[in-house]
Amino acid sequence: MEIYFTGIIIGVATFFIIGLFHPLVIKGEYYFGVKCWWVFAIAGVVTIIASLLVANVLWSTLLAVVGASSFWSIKELFDQRERVRKGWFPKNPKRK
């Protein structure tokens, strides 16, 4: 009986990738506001295209997860602006 770790690796890596994007959204909104949405959009497009070109299932899947997380972060960036407006997160006093 062989044991395959690909699914577990993808699951754990997905957990960490999503966990990485959470503070990126918070810091991005804090320092740049929602103006940095295009960085997430470009990252999403590049990683989704890369996932289509990589033959290895593990790396292709992880690139797709990064791409999907990048696109989801655009929505979260605008949601974060609302959370800051409601006072749930601190507002950057230096940013206009």
Image: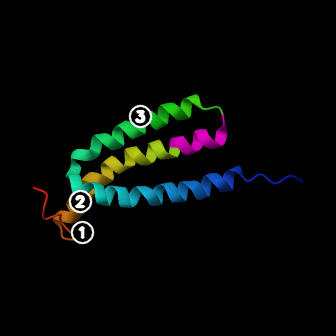
Q: Is residue 27 left or right of residue 70?
A: left
Q: Is residue 68 left or right of residue 29?
A: right
What numbered label is drawn on residue 45?
Answer: 3
Front-most of 94 and 80? 94
Q: Is residue 9 left or right of residue 66?
A: right
Mark 1 element type: loop
Q: Earlier in the sequence, mark 1 or mark 2?
A: 2
Q: Earlier in the sequence, mark 3 or mark 2?
A: 2
* Residue at position x 34%, y 39% in the image: 41
* Residue at position x 18%, y 65% in the image: 91
Q: In front: mark 1 or mark 2? A: 2
Residue flagged by tag 2: what amino acid is it?
Tyr
Q: Specify the segment rendered in magenta.
A: 56-64
Mark 3 element type: helix
Main SS category, magenta section? helix
Identify the image quadrant of residue 71. Answer: top left
45 within the magenta span: no
Q: Mark 1 highlights which residue?
A: 89
Q: Mark 2 highlights which residue?
A: 30
